[in-house]
């Protein structure tokens, strides 16, 4: 199987087959502007019979196999397998894909649908979870590391001090939204001159997607330059 994941191929295959799916996980973070490396595509898929058939047929040419399973283990990719299961971590000739019939903190496809937006990704229009919901999903899964930016890393060209959130707890950057390791969430606010800013607490859960615009984060020393 392929060690490299071709995200574009996956999205095109699912889109062209008419599969109902929502992009979540690391690729969703990348779509929203996060600087986090990801190695598989995570999607929440609808579980109705028509969609199960479409999903099965779409992935069949990519020779899906259970990721991490010993070679030679009997595994048949068909509608019955998909219907009897729920969440599948697969390796294919296009790379790794996680098919989620249900996602922690988000429920089923129909439950998650109101918290999605249409985006242009990899040359097609598809559905992606919103940034506030993505952060909520990360929290529910116990995964707050939504950026690869290290605590000592810098960004932007201005200095900024942490305000309402403690400056002693390390933060990780997600666009303008900062998620601290203890789960506190804040956002960077610029002053009217655009040459400084401070960190303010956000309500939980986050309610506005536009709170996540911008490209500056905080390191362990609470400076941004």
Image (cartoon, helix red, strand yellow):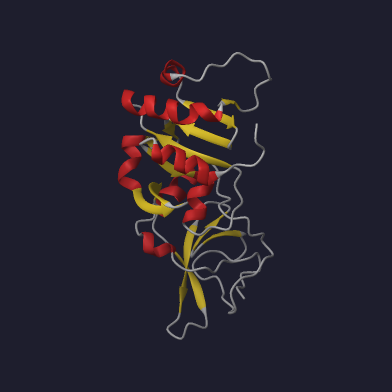
Q: Is residue 167 left or right of residue 107?
A: right
Q: Residue furthest top?
A: 74
Residue placed furthest toward the bottom: 193
Asked where in the image residue 142 lies, by quadrant, the reply is: top right
From this viewpoint, is residue 138 visible?
yes
Residue 197 or 14: which is nearer the viewer?
A: 14
Image position of 119 (left or right of 10): left
In the picture, the quarter occupied by the C terminus is: bottom right
**Image spot of residue 199 (x, y percent):** 50, 69
Q: How many marks?
A: 0
- State the quadrant of the N terminus: top right
Judging depth in this view, the residue of 57 and 21 nearest the camera is 57
Position of residue 138 relative to residue 20, above or below, is below
Quarter occupied by residue 12 = top left
Q: Position of residue 154 (x, y in %)?
A: 65, 69
The residue located at (52%, 83%) in the rendering is: 195
Residue at position x 44%, y 25% in the image: 56
Q: Is 19 on the left-hand or right-hand side of 73?
A: left
- Horizontal and vertical percent position of residue 170: 62, 59
Where is residue 24? Give x, y as percent: 46, 44
Image position of 11 with respect to 50: above or below: below
Give 25 or 39, whichever is nearer the viewer.
39
Q: Is residue 21 left or right of residue 42?
A: left
Give the residue at x 60% y 73%.
224
For the point 51% across and 42% down, which residue is it?
9
């Amino acid at each position: 199987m392929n060690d490299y994941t071709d995200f574009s191929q996956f999205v095109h295959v699912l889109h062209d087959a008419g599969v109902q799916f929502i992009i979540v996980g690391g690729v969703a973070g990348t779509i929203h502007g996060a600087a986090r490396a990801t190695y598989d595509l995570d999607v929440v898929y609808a579980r109705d019979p028509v969609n199960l058939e479409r999903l099965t047929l779409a992935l069949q040419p990519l020779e899906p196999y259970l990721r991490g399973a010993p070679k030679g283990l009997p595994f048949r990719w068909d509608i019955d397998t998909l219907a009897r299961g729920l969440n599948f971590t697969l390796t294919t000739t296009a790379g790794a894909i996680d098919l989620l019939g249900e996602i922690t903190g988000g429920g089923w496809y129909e439950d998650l649908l109101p918290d999605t937006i249409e985006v242009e990704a990899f040359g097609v229009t598809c559905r992606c979870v919103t940034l506030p919901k993505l952060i909520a999903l990360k929290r529910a899964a116990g995964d707050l590391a939504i950026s690869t930016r290290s605590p000592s890393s810098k960004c932007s060209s201005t200095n900024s001090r942490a305000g309402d959130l403690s400056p002693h707890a390390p933060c990780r950057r997600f666009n303008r939204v900062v998620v601290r390791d203890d789960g506190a969430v804040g956002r960077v606010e610029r002053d009217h001159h655009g040459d400084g800013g401070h960190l303010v607490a956000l309500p939980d859960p986050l309610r506005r997607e536009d709170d996540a615009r911008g490209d500056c984060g905080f390191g362990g020393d609470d400076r941004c330059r």
